[in-house]
Image: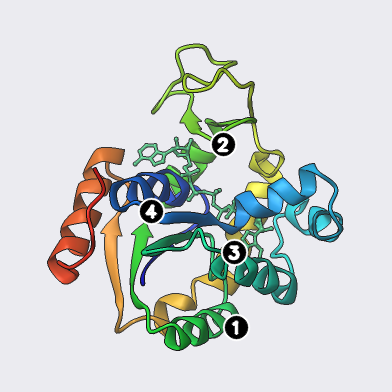
Amino acid sequence: MITIILLGPPGAGKGTQAKDLAKEFQFLHISTGDLLRENVKRNSPLGLKAKEFMEHGELVPDKLVDEMLLEKLNSPQVNNGFVLDGYPRNVSQAKFLDNFLKQNNSKSFILYLDTSEDTIIERLSGRRICSNCQAIYHLKNMPPKNPLYCDICGGRLYQRSDDREETIKNRLLVYIKETAPLLEYYKDRLVRINANDDKDIVFGNMLKVIKNDYSEIPRGN
Ligand code: AP5
């Protein structure tokens, strides 16, 4: 099993790139943010507990997120491998993941999407998501044909409630305090990618790294 872990601040492009990597290698894309938002939308017990943390840009408690992730990792959908986006978010989650990867003898590599603060703000404030298929757009950088509807499925586009200015600021603070220490934790294993570049350039640079290091990764179509 192969694991691709995308690290980076909010708005770095983790979700955008994870979708394309998963398609390229036919891996499962696991976004803990998307899974949590789905739970909030259907008012599940997990969603009810997670909602307030997410609205304030705080991390949802580890125990809830770890259990949710483990259920997904143990599902048959994980076949050859998976792309993780939004997890781990702190050292405790990284240790939890390491434990799973070790038990499953998984090859993993870790790509850090290095992004400037100006880029983050610009990307988050222009982001729009499809309420149906979760496709990610940007009003300027990756505009949909119609700013209200998804090009792929016609679903209504919306702005995430945590993409408001106040919440963005807190998400960045939480990132610096909780998630940035992972750069030290993974320092011998991670590869830094300049994520300020255009989407296709970032994707090409990630592919180069993956193919150089892991030539046995099966290719998609
Ligand atoms: P989550 O959904 O994981 O949010 P995040 O990590 O803050 O990251 P984002 O989804 O905001 O950004 P992204 O890097 O995926 O960027 P994107 O590709 O969309 O988490 C949300 C909340 O859930 C958390 O605050 C927390 O409460 C909770 N949570 C989630 N996981 C958790 C965990 N493990 N533990 C505890 N709590 C957890 O791109 C952004 C925009 O930029 C888009 O508009 C896109 O079109 C555009 N764009 C992307 N790449 C480029 C490019 N190269 N050039 C130009 N534009 C680009």
Q: Quadrant of the N terminus?
A: bottom left
The residue under label 3 is 72
Please tell me whether residue 138 is drawn above or below residue 34 in the rendered image. Answer: above
- Rendered image: mark on residue 92: 1
- Rendered image: mark on residue 115: 4
* Residue 18 picture location, percent across and down: 41, 51
Q: CA distance from mark 2 to mark 4?
A: 23 Å
Q: CA distance from mark 4 to mark 3?
A: 29 Å
Q: CA distance from mark 3 to mark 1?
A: 19 Å
Q: Element type at marker 2?
A: loop
> In front: mark 4 or mark 1?
1
* Lower sequence index among marks 4 and 3: 3
Q: Amino acid at mark 4?
A: Thr
Give the residue drawn at x 18%, y 68%. Answer: 216
Examine the rendering and report whether any part of residue 7 can be seen: no
Give the residue drawn at x 51%, y 87%. Answer: 99
* Lower sequence index among marks 1 and 2: 1
Examine the rendering and report whether any part of residue 64 can be seen: yes
* Lower sequence index among marks 3 and 1: 3
> In front: mark 1 or mark 2?
2
* Residue 183 picture location, percent across and down: 41, 76
Query: Do callouts 2 and 3 mark residues in contact (Cβ within 8 Å)?
Result: no
Q: Is residue 15 left or right of residue 214?
A: right
Q: Amino acid at mark 2?
A: Gln
Q: Amino acid at mark 3?
A: Lys
Q: Is residue 131 left or right of residue 119?
A: right
Q: Quadrant of residue 188?
A: bottom left
Q: Residues within 10 Å of mark 2 (few under 14, many from 20)?
A: some
